[in-house]
Image (spheres, rainbow, N blue to C red):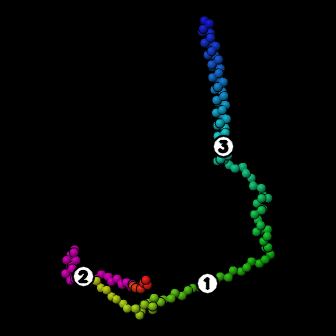
Amino acid sequence: MPANTATIDERKQENALLKQQNAELTAKLNWFEEQFRLSQHQRFGRSSEQTNPEQLSLFNEAEVEAKPELAKPTVEEITYTRRKKSGHREAMLKDLPVETIEYRLPEEKQVCSCCGGKLHEMSTEIRQELKIIGTRSS
């Protein structure tokens, strides 16, 4: 029986040591959780900073320095309409030569592909274009 009692005593000591280590680790875990909670609160929580009302008066220089007894200047509204210059482009281009280009299909191609009837003019497109020809000096 002496060997058996030795193992029981060893088991009791080991059990006490494990309980002590468990208590230490639990205390460390609780401390780390509290530190994490505090850091999260500092980072994301409400700010408890209060603004001193005397500090706000530092930015009221314009109101303090303003002289309310002075009359406000009157605002005069001026409105006008511009006259659009009409015919200016036409007047500048009236002396330039005009070239008319008409595109016509030959009579044998003026046949509708659907019904075989004669094609007719549907619309006319008029385009004005300036061709600027300059000389280059070398």
* Up/down of 88 relative to 59, above or below: below
The residues tagged by marks 2 and 1 sit, at their Cα atoms, a distance apart of 57 Å
Foreground: disc 3 or disc 1: 3
Find out whether the residues at labels 3 and 1 contact each other: C-beta distance under 8 Å. Answer: no
> Is residue 119 within the magenta segment?
yes
The amino acid pointed to by label 3 is Ser
Q: Label 1, on which residue?
A: 79
Other-residue count near label 3 (Cα within 10 Å), few / some / many at <14 / 14–19 / ≥20: few
Other-residue count near label 1 (Cα within 10 Å), few / some / many at <14 / 14–19 / ≥20: few
x 50%, y 88%: residue: 85
Foreground: disc 2 or disc 1: 2
* Up/down of 66 relative to 46, above or below: below
Residue 138 location, quadrant: bottom left
Q: Label 2, on which residue?
A: 105
Q: Label 3, on which residue?
A: 39
> Is residue 12 within the magenta segment?
no
**What is the magenta range?**
104-129
